[in-house]
Image: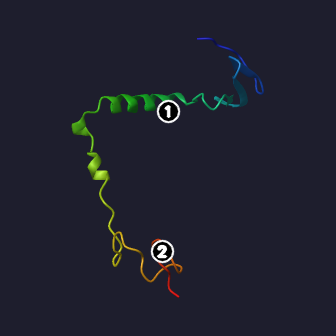
């Protein structure tokens, strides 16, 4: 592990695109700023470890431990009085729901 000493407003470069800056120091807490390309994922270590644990758990899941996809694909209930596939009646602008060559109300 490389250990560097920095003061407030000083930075460390990692490669050409990642800059780590010391923003503030108060007691035992150090605030750092990280400037990196959007493609570089930056996590606090405890968050990164939690993500890794979740990934391992998901990769080791068996079909028996997962809910069936069908439970999430239940058909939606239709509103009372609506007919499936037919044009809406008594609603909308003149000519809506009319097929080709059919005139709307006069």
The residue depicted at 47 percent of the width and 77 percent of the height is: 102
- Residue 58's disc is none
> Relative to 56, is 10 on the left or the right?
right
User: How is the structure coloured here?
Assistant: rainbow
> Relative to 4, is 92 on the left or the right?
left
Residue 101 against residue 1 in the figure, above or below: below
Q: Earlier in the sequence, mark 1 or mark 2?
A: 1
- Residue 47's disc is 1
The N terminus - image quarter: top right
x then y, percent, for residue 55: 39, 30
Between the C-alphas of marks 1 and 2, the distance is 62 Å
The residue depicted at 45 percent of the width and 72 percent of the height is: 99
Residue 99 against residue 43 in the figure, above or below: below
What residue occupies the far top of the structure in this picture? 1
x then y, percent, for residue 104: 50, 81
SS type, badge 2: loop
Circle 2 is placed at which residue position? 101
Query: As rendered, which of 29 and 75 lies closer to the eye?
Result: 75
Query: As rendered, which of 32 and 94 lies closer to the eye?
Result: 94
> Relative to 90, is 42 on the left or the right?
right
């Amino acid at each position: 592990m490389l250990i560097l000493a920095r003061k407030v407003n000083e930075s460390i470069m990692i490669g050409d695109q990642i800059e780590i800056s010391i923003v503030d120091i108060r007691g035992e807490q150090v605030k750092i700023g990280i400037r990196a390309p959007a493609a570089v994922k930056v996590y606090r270590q405890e968050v990164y470890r939690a993500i890794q644990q979740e990934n391992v758990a998901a990769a080791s899941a068996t079909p028996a431990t997962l809910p069936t996809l069908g439970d999430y694909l239940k058909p939606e209930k239709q509103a009372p009085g609506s007919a499936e596939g037919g044009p809406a009646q008594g609603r909308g602008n003149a000519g809506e729901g009319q097929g080709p060559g059919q005139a709307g109300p006069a």
